[in-house]
Amino acid sequence: MLAESEERRYGELAGRSQRQLNEQLERLGELNAFRQNYATKNSDRSTVSSAHWQDYQNFLQRLNTAVSAQQQIVRDYERNLETHRQRWMAKRRRVESLERVLEKYAAEDQVHEGRTEQKQLDELASSQSGCFDSDRDEP
């Protein structure tokens, strides 16, 4: 039960890590979409002043920096998820191993109980057979 509890806890951690990764991927997608939209909308240099163009370039550079930072965050969350998955799988394998051991012991107990019961039945039958044989010997 303890191993199952640990396995469940690690499974929950892996699930939480997956949700966090999905959130970070969504943010990365939003940043990329915003950057693409901003770059497309403001790419015509001929209609803007040089100061506006400089501001555009600076903002686009900050967006690129934010995208790079978000990509690093996503990589970190992917590593975190992989760590949690590996730990969860190790606990899962341990639970399965313990379950197989318990099943083996239960099967051995059943065989032992069956043999003991059969031995008792054989002894009972033998003793009853002996009683019947002694009844026949009497005149």
Image (tube, rainbow, N blue to C red):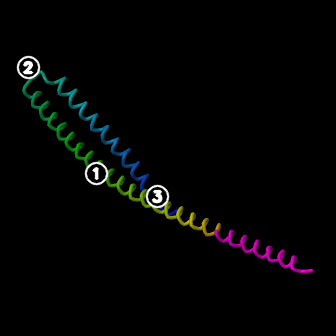
Q: CA distance from mark 2 to mark 3?
A: 68 Å
Of the two numbered discs 3 and 1 in the rendering, the one whose residue sits closer to the viewer: 3
Q: Is the C-beta separation of discs 2 and 3 under 8 Å? A: no
Check the image and name the residue furthest to the right.
139
First-in-chain label (3 vs 1): 1
Choose between 62 and 2: the one closer to the eye. 2
The residue positioned 21% from the left and 29% from the top of the image is 36
Mark 2 burial class by Cα count in 10 Å: few <14, some 14-19, many 20+: few
Q: Name the residue tied to disc 2.
A: 46
Q: CA distance from mark 3 to mark 1?
A: 26 Å
Asked which secondary structure carries label 1, the reply is: helix
Q: Is the C-beta separation of discs 3 and 1 under 8 Å? A: no
Check the image and name the residue furthest to the top.
47
Q: Which residues are magenta?
A: 115-139
Q: Name the residue tied to disc 1.
A: 79
Asked which secondary structure carries label 2, the reply is: helix
The residue positioned 42% from the left and 56% from the top of the image is 10
Picture coordinates of residue 56, whole percent (x, y): 14, 30
Q: Name the residue tied to disc 3.
A: 96
Query: Callout 3, which amino acid?
Result: Glu
Picture coordinates of residue 23, whole percent (x, y): 34, 41
Above-or-below relation of 120 to 51: below
